[in-house]
């Protein structure tokens, strides 16, 4: 009887450890996804800023050229 009880307790402990591992693995994956999402957003902002700066520089150059006779 005691051996069966010990075996059952060991089985419960192993199952609980698997659940805990899965939970923590999921949290790590969520963190990785959030990090990648933040990097993607940062890259998008930098790209849009660069395009805006080039557009403004071109517009200023065109304006200055239009002032010439």
Image: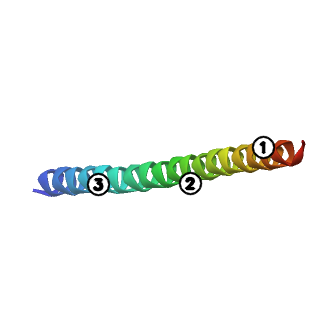
Residue placed at 29% from the left, 54% from the top? 19
When asked about the image quadrant of residue 58, the answer is top right
Mark pair 2, 3: CA separation: 29 Å
Q: Earlier in the sequence, mark 3 or mark 1?
A: 3
* Disc 3 to disc 1: CB gap under 8 Å: no
Location of the N terminus (image quadrant): bottom left
Q: In this rendering, would 69 be left or right of 15?
A: right
Location of the C terminus (image quadrant): top right
For the residue labelled by badge 2, is the local secondary structure a helix, a strand or a loop? helix
Find disc 1 in the rendering and name its residue: 62
Q: Position of residue 25 (x, y in %)?
A: 41, 49
Find disc 3 in the rendering and name its residue: 19
Residue placed at 16% from the left, 54% from the top? 8
Residue depth check, mark 2 versus mark 1: number of the one nearer the observer: 1
How many residues crowd around disc 3 within 10 Å: few (fewer than 14), some, or many (20 or more)?
A: few
Mark pair 3, 1: CA separation: 64 Å
Q: Where is residue 62 in the image (x, y as percent from the top left)?
A: 78, 43
Q: Which of marks 2 and 1 is nearer the N terminus?
A: 2
Q: Where is residue 26 in the image (x, y as percent from the top left)?
A: 37, 52
* Disc 2 to disc 1: CB gap under 8 Å: no
């Amino acid at each position: 009887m005691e051996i069966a009880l010990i075996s059952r307790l060991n089985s419960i402990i192993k199952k609980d450890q698997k659940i805990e591992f899965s939970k923590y693995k999921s949290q790590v994956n969520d963190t990785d996804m959030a990090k990648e999402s933040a990097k993607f957003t940062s890259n998008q902002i930098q790209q849009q800023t660069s395009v805006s700066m080039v557009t403004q520089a071109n517009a200023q150059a065109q304006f200055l050229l239009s002032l010439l006779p």
